[in-house]
Amino acid sequence: MRIIRSPATMTAWSERLRREGVTIGFVPTMGALHTGHRSLIRAARLRCDALVVSIFVNPTQFGPTEDLTRYPRTRLKDHALCRAEGVDVCFEPTSTAMYPEGFQTTVTVPSIARRWEGDARPHHFSGVATVVTKLFGIVRPHLALFGQKDFQQSMLVRQLTRDLNLGVEIIVRPTVRERDGLAMSSRNVYLSMGERAVAATLYDSLRAGAEAIRNGIVDTSAVHAIMVNTIGQEPAIRVDYLAICDPVTLDPLSLVTTKAVLLGAVRLGSIRLIDNLIVSTRSTRNR
Ligand code: AMP
């Protein structure tokens, strides 16, 4: 496996392979790789000839009070995982290489970034949109894989790739969970034992909401009450939002007639957890 730090070297590598007709797959990450990342890498490996994983803790997607400096960094373990999964290139640019002096351009996707995570983290999505656009420009992949765990982010990436004609096929893969249902995340290592013990309640709450919809409850205020009630059983958890939304527009729904995405974000001590579930009504599933 090659480790490439220079964007120019990365592009030259990809361009050479593209000329030879090689299909390039790409998994962008911020490192501290876990089984969720591994599942994206494995799914990519099956779909491409050459595979690039980027590891870049992108400063522009962190707010001033967020955890940029203490974001987990496990470089050598990450390399070992990538090697074991047959990754061809680990692309690890520096912040200065990505944002040299004089850097100006930002990419925004206003309608998607407007609410939920965008509301809670004002500059987050322009940071994500800009870095993904840059990474696509540098790596020049044919296809790129993202996790449903970050549902709003995956919608944003699909939208900007389409809007800007980036020519990358976007594949979104299911969330990988711990045994108790907690969505895997690099930040989970910061949960104390007590927090970890109750962290899966977010997933329990989404599941309770999904179950209610599958059982025929269409009024989202009733579904919401069920979700809030489940979370309320763990007083250590503070809800940022629990929402029942249209999976295409992310607008909150008042009635679930076909399909919905249940979005949740909570705080547990200093850690913020997000998760989501997509659910179809019984009538849609029986069609
Ligand atoms: P991150 O390193 O957190 O920026 O995530 C890199 C990619 O891995 C993103 O596309 C995430 O959505 C995806 N990812 C993170 N956690 C999971 C998970 N538990 N299951 C599946 N994909 C994930």
Image: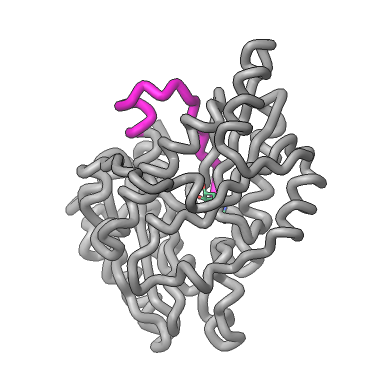
Up/down of 226 relative to 218, above or below: below
- Residue name at image x 17 percent, y 53 percent: 254
Give residue 119's position: percent from left, percent from top.
24, 61
- Residue name at image x 57 percent, y 79 percent: 196
Give residue 225's position: percent from left, percent from top.
27, 71
Give residue 126's position: percent from left, percent from top.
31, 48
- For this orientation, the residue located farthest to the left is 254
Q: Is residue 127 magenta?
A: no
Picture quadrant where residue 185 is located: bottom right
Quadrant into which the C terminus falls: top left
Q: Nearer the viewer, residue 24 or 45?
A: 24
Q: Nearer the viewer, residue 120 or 174?
A: 120
Q: Is residue 171 magenta?
A: yes
- Residue name at image x 50 percent, y 45 percent: 97
User: In this picture, which residue range is highlighted in magenta?
Assistant: 159-175
Inspect this view and state whether residue 66 appears. Answer: yes
Q: Nearer the viewer, residue 212 or 116?
A: 116
**Is 224 left or right of 268, judged from the image as shown?**
left
Quadrant into which the N terminus falls: top right
**Is 271 left or right of 117, judged from the image as shown?**
right
Up/down of 102 relative to 58, above or below: above
Up/down of 11 relative to 93, above or below: above
Up/down of 270 relative to 213, above or below: below
- Residue name at image x 50 percent, y 39 percent: 172
